[in-house]
């Protein structure tokens, strides 16, 4: 029961060329491919970000994107220094099209 992913996002379909819609992430491989493409696009347009996309990092990006996608969305990211809070926030904002 708890092994089933419960992630929803709105940035996978536009990446595939479809209209923006809020859908469930059914495959982590598809999510990883999308995020790797977005990271490569970020590295071409902005400064180079050497980011390792492991499962927890991908889940955090999806959550941050969901929060930022709301008009009044805000989040408090808590963790030790060097844990990736700023990097994940930057890539999430880039994915959603915010000018950072």
Image (cartoon, grey):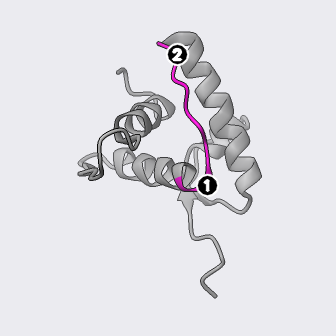
Q: Residue at x 36, y 52 (%)?
A: 67
In depth, the one of 26 and 32 nearer the eye is 32
Q: Is residue 67 shown left or right of residue 31?
A: left
Q: Secondary structure at mark 2?
A: loop
Q: Residue at x 55, y 26 (%)?
A: 50
Q: Position of residue 82 (x, y in %)?
A: 36, 38
Question: Does the segment drawn in magenta span residue 64?
Answer: no
Q: Position of residue 79 (x, y in %)?
A: 30, 51
Q: Is residue 14 shown left or right of residue 66?
A: right
Q: Residue at x 64, y 45 (%)?
A: 12
* Whether residue 45 is situated above or below residue 28 in the rendered picture: above
Question: Does the segment drawn in magenta span residue 55?
Answer: yes
In depth, the one of 92 and 14 nearer the eye is 92
- Residue with the mark numbered 2: 48
- Residue with the mark numbered 1: 55
Residue contact at pointers 1 and 2, CB within 8 angstroms: no
Residue count near mark 2 (Cα–Cα under 10 Å), binned few <14, some 14–19, many ≥20: few
Residue range highlighted in magenta: 47-56
Q: Secondary structure at mark 1?
A: helix
Question: Which SS type dominates the magenta stretch?
Answer: loop
Image quadrant holding the N terminus, namely bottom right
Q: Residue at x 29, y 45 (%)?
A: 71
């Amino acid at each position: 029961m708890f092994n089933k992913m419960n992630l929803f996002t709105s940035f996978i379909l536009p990446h595939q060329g479809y209209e923006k819609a809020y859908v469930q992430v059914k495959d982590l491989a598809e999510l990883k491919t999308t995020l790797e493409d977005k990271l490569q696009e970020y590295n071409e347009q902005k400064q180079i970000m050497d980011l390792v996309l492991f499962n927890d990092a991908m889940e955090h990006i999806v959550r941050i994107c969901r929060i930022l996608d709301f008009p009044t969305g805000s989040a408090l990211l808590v963790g030790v220094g060097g844990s990736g809070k700023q990097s994940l926030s930057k890539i999430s904002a880039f994915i959603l099209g915010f000018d950072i």
